[in-house]
Amino acid sequence: MPLKEHKAGLAPIDRTGPKPPGTAGTGRGTAVGAWIGTAVRIGLAVVWAWAGLAKISDPQAAAQAVRVYRILPEALVKPFGYGLPFLEIALALLLLVGLGTRIAAVLSAVLLLVYIASIASVWARGISIDCGCFGGGGAVAASQTSYWQEILRDCGFLLLAGWLVWRPKTRLSLDGWLAA
Amino acid sequence: MSNKNDGGKRSARERMQEERAKQETAARKKRQLTVILAALVVIAAAVVIGIVVQNGRSSSYDAAKDAPAGTVGNTRLLIPVGATNAPSTVTIYEDPRCPACEQFETGMKSTINQLLAQGKIQIQYHIASFIDRHDGGKGSKNAANALACAQNVGRFHDYHDVLYANQPDETNDAWADKSILITLAKQVPGLDSPSFESCVNGNTYGSWVTAVQSDFDKSGYNSTPTVLLNGTSAYPTYNNEDISPANFTKWVDAANKGKPLASVPSASAEALASPTAHNNPPASAGASAGHS
């Protein structure tokens, strides 16, 4: 890890010794990977921020977007409709500053899997809705549904989350700054 | 802690390094745990605060003081038109910006007015406002509030008809501009007044409008117009027949068979029966159907 200062008073420790070669990763490959990771992290942050912010201006619409999935009982519709956008915004913030990147990525992946499963379930039950992924939502005409596109898009986001679970160390992150 | 049983074979330097590596690993683990905990706290705090804030923003409707005068139903979300003791009830869910509602109104208005005048039906209007969500904008909510303002002074029906006769294209959010709603109110005799204008401009019935939409959201009906004849869907079909002025009259008469009709004061019956009822000035936008 070039260009990094170690804590004062401690001599540099060679960690490559006891570890199996390859895992620590040295040289250009890791550096490029860390920068790719940064791009992925910011990209996913933008996605979550966009998704979350689009849903907070109208809580009633957000609740309805959840209600029309007909998965949750009425008592849970509002907590989820009101809370999910803020979960998304919190994930966006964590990813943006790179704090707890791996846990944020794991939670992102879980949330995306839940979304994909929900859309698939609606699709399988023959309900016609807009997923409400980026605001909006609610019932639409059967010809207006776009479940394929919605699921594919979420799978794309899932890949981003997966990358960060695999390689959470990225440049320009609070995680990196704290570990330095 | 240390490796005394190594018999001092290992150098002090080696031992120190090992010790330090252990400490570093432990410190790293601790740091990682702290970070994970911090991330979870951020998320939990955001979600809890979000739910509380959004709850506070959306649950302020109090039927006792937020509903316009003359509204009916458990939580006073419905606007009644016509005699209360009419034998049939027609429930209509409409969004002011909904083009299909405009077509329904244009095609069926004179028939419905006739049925009202004959004391055969009472209408209960649910003024939904969800098109603002779909297409963006504020026109539905503004218009729904203005309709509530008109209801509060007993001019709902006339103003409702004027709005549909002058409805902008669905994607044109003309009614985001409240002054247009006020200008249209001038077509209804006795409606426009300083208090009406401040009601429209101040969004006086905003929480009622939200509550009505919330009620529609929970109703399970998901499009407008939704028209129910005594609780049974009558739009676009009823008993496998398409809705039309003749069919609708027939359905109502069949439902009313053997039941006494409500008596409607002759003055308001005449006003409803007039071909120009609630339609001044003549609508410009292709509203030729339905005017006998």
Image: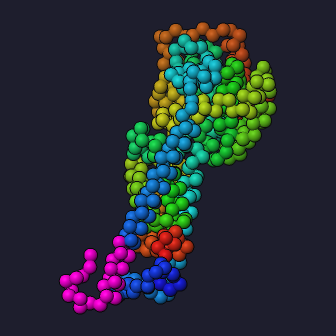
| Scheme of colours in the image | rainbow
Residue A42 image offset from top left, x and y in percent? 55, 68
Residue B168 drawn above or below residue B193:
below
Residue A64 drawn above or below residue A19:
above
How many tags in the picture? 0
Residue A148 image offset from top left, x and y in percent? 46, 60
Q: Residue at x 48, y 33 (%)?
A: B219
Q: Which of the 4 image quarters holds residue B188?
A: top right
Residue A41 image offset from top left, x and y in percent? 51, 69
Q: Is residue B263 left or right of residue B159?
A: left
> What range is drawn magenta here?
B1-26
Q: Between residue B20 and residue B42, name the one nearer to us.
A: B20
Residue B153 drawn above or below residue A115:
above
Q: Is residue A171 left or right of residue B274?
A: left
| Secondary structure that dominates the magenta span | helix
Q: Between residue A98 and residue B248, name the one nearer to us.
A: A98
Q: Between residue A114 and residue B162, name the one nearer to us.
A: A114
Q: Is residue B6 found inside the magenta-colored segment of the image?
A: yes
Q: Is residue B204 visible?
A: yes
Q: Residue at x 39, y 72 (%)?
A: B28
Residue A167 drawn above or below residue A140:
below
Q: Is residue A66 visible?
A: no
Q: Is residue B235 found inside the magenta-colored segment of the image?
A: no
Q: Is residue B185 left or right of residue A94?
A: right
Q: Residue at x 34, y 83 (%)?
A: B16
Residue B98 image offset from top left, x and y in percent? 63, 39
